[in-house]
Amino acid sequence: MADSDTPHTPPLSLPDAIHEAVEPGTALLRLETTHSREGVLDGAWWPRTRDIETELPPLISALAEHLGPITRVGVDASAWNGLPTRLIIDGRVVHLDSDPVGDDTVLITRGDQDHFALLVVPPDTTPEAARVAMARAVNVGNITQAAEILIATIPEPRPQRGSRGDPAGGHP
């Protein structure tokens, strides 16, 4: 069998350089693939920055393709660089609410009261840690909260040598 006769199978996970390789305006998103919605989270989102006006439109566009029109988004205002009260995305008004959901979660509302909760993977997360966190979030029947998933999958940054609290004896 020639190479051209071999069916091409796309990769099942994100490539290592995915965060740097995606085009601006592309949402990195995973959704649960079941209609039961039994888990705590319905999906996961990995924004590239903390600029909500840049990151939210591609997310809403991608979600609208699968879920229908999105009317509201709830985020923790302290996690983003500015929070407008609304954005016009794909010709529709999307209202933004400052909810105390934590910087690890975004709440999406379709219609009047149909809510979806997405894990928010921090922009500076390594691709491997992001893959693991996103996979755990969309695991059918997941009962782990977003913050717990991030704590379990994303290593804390290590202090740089010479910084305060560095056991190597750095100076302020």
Image (tube, grey):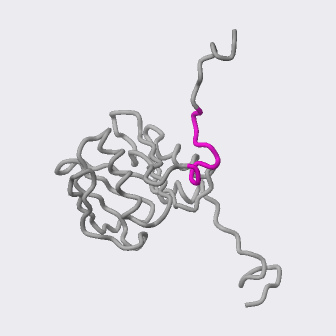
Drawn side of residue 14 relative to residue 169, left or right: left
Between residue 143 and residue 169, name the one nearer to us: 169
Residue 24: x percent and y percent?
Answer: 47, 54
Between residue 148 and residue 130, name the one nearer to us: 130
Range shown magenta = 11-21
Hey, which residue is sitting farthest top in the picture? 1
Drawn side of residue 136 relative to residue 53, left or right: right
Residue 139: x percent and y percent?
Answer: 48, 40
Hey, which residue is sitting farthest right in the picture? 168
- Using the rendered view, name the quadrant where residue 54 is placed: bottom left
Whether 15 is among the magenta residues is yes
Between residue 161 and residue 60, name the one nearer to us: 60
Question: Can you say whether 154 is above or below 165 in the image?
Answer: above
Q: Secondary structure of the magenta portion, mostly?
A: loop
Residue 83: x percent and y percent?
Answer: 33, 71
Task: Indicate the quadrant containing the C terminus: top left, top right, bottom left or bottom right.
Answer: bottom right
Whether 91 is among the magenta residues is no
Residue 162: x percent and y percent?
Answer: 77, 82
Q: Residue shown at 52%/54% (left/top)? A: 149
Q: How many marks?
A: 0
Drawn side of residue 115 relative to residue 31, left or right: left
Q: Residue shown at 56%/53% (left/top)? A: 19
Question: Can you say whether 138 is above or below 109 in the image?
Answer: above
Task: Indicate the quadrant containing the N terminus: top left, top right, bottom left or bottom right.
Answer: top right
Drawn side of residue 79 relative to residue 151, left or right: left
Hey, which residue is sitting farthest bottom in the picture? 172
